[in-house]
Amino acid sequence: MNNSIYVYEGQLRELISNKNKDLVRGVAFEWKDEGVFHIHTKFPKVAPSGYPVISFFKIETEIGDFENSEVNFKEIVDSLPKSDLSSHKSVIGIFLYLDKEKLHQKAYIQTQNGVELCDVNYIPEKSELYSRCKGLLEVDILENKNVLIIGLGSFGSIIAVELAKAGIGSFTLVDFDRIELSNVSRHICGVNELGRLKTLAVRDSILVKNPFAKIETHEIDINDNRNILEQIIKDTDIVICATDNNRSRFNINEIAFQNNKTVLYGRAITRAEGGDIFKLNGQNPPCYCCLIGENNGMKYGGEEEITSIEQANSVLPSYTTPEQKDMAVQVGLSSDILPMCNLMVKLALVELSKGLNSGISSLENELTYNYYFWGNRREKNYLNYAPFNDSKGMPTILKWYGANIPKDSNCFLCSSNS
Ligand SMILES: [Zn+2]
């Protein structure tokens, strides 16, 4: 198999339109011993994968020169500084020639074995990247929708990337934490991103899926930055609330309610034995306060999953010992929280596609509840559920159930506003 080179179509187009006849140095990376190379005309927005390789582009204006590319390639390689050649195993050259109808290309690689021809593959421009979603989703419209994701832990990070894969083109990401070792087992980011701000690491995970996405990040605690929170909620089409504390959820609830914005609240409950999703439907009650009740009493669902010591500190009584707090941090499996992430993504896409004649519209008539719950295991809150294989029509784990939470007539927010 020939060596495979991947280049961005848009970058080549730009290079050709500049009519640059000089040698243009590329920025190239290889997967060692796999024969796969990615070559850019400028340093990529996302820190690249692979090991650096020397590369260049040459635009030929005469067909004769283009046909003679292999000889030219060897001459150019010989003229490169010897220090470059000694520190890199390979050199790649891409030769381009534009005739009246089409772009022709030839690519060569110089390795320790000599000069070899390479196959050139194009990474298309954005209109083609999500063509597979067309028919099911109105990708042209979703491309212009903004999703605000507050909290970029396991929920927020997974939802962000899934929405990017569906063709959402604009994101506002909010979190002030960094990626820690304890996050890795459930987060979209890996060990190679430890210590990075979650906002920037998740931004890069989105850009890998959709290099054309517009992404704004805020490394803030929303509880201390109400003005910013208000502005970004006003500017968005939908809010995904994936924070781990009720104070932030109440703040989001109040501002979103006042600004008539939809919020999807998702959470896992103790050790991700299950989870639930609540949808705040703009100014239509109930709101998140109606769901939770007075004194954070959790009227519906079970105890919230505690995933960090900071969260344990904020929700457990002050007399809890450090050992007890350690015990309280019980993290469920990634596969146990994926069902919640998955339904939140669908709810978001249905919401953003409302009124459009898209393939997902039929779900509008099905996902009509304001509250959804799911059990992963027949434990605690789900102890009374029937066995999955013998349910006889009774509720079981591993299935979604919907309910309509009523408005709380004493709710300070939605009762005083309506
Ligand atoms: Zn309310």
Image (cartoon, rainbow, N blue to C red):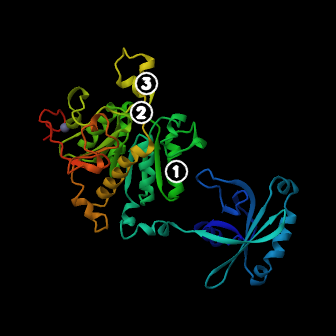
Residue 332 falls in which quadrant of the image? top left
Inspect this view and state whether residue 173 appears.
no
The residue that disc 1 covers is 205
Q: Position of residue 306 (x, y in %)?
A: 39, 31
Name the residue rendered at 23%, 26% in the picture.
Answer: 295
Residue picked out by circle 3: 327
Disc sitting over residue 221 in the figure: 2
Q: What amino acid is labelled 1 in the image?
A: Ser
| 3 and 1 marks in contact (CB < 8 Å) | no
What amino acid does circle 2 point to? Asp
- Identify whether 157 is placed above or below 67: above
Q: Nearer the viewer, residue 238 or 16?
A: 238
Mark 1–mark 2 Cα distance, whole angstroms, equals 22 Å
In the picture provided, is 90 more to the left or to the right than 124? right
Measured Cα–Cα span from mark 3 to mark 1: 32 Å
Query: In the image shown, does 115 or 126 lie closer to the viewer?
Result: 115
Query: Where's residue 365, x and y in %?
Result: 21, 60
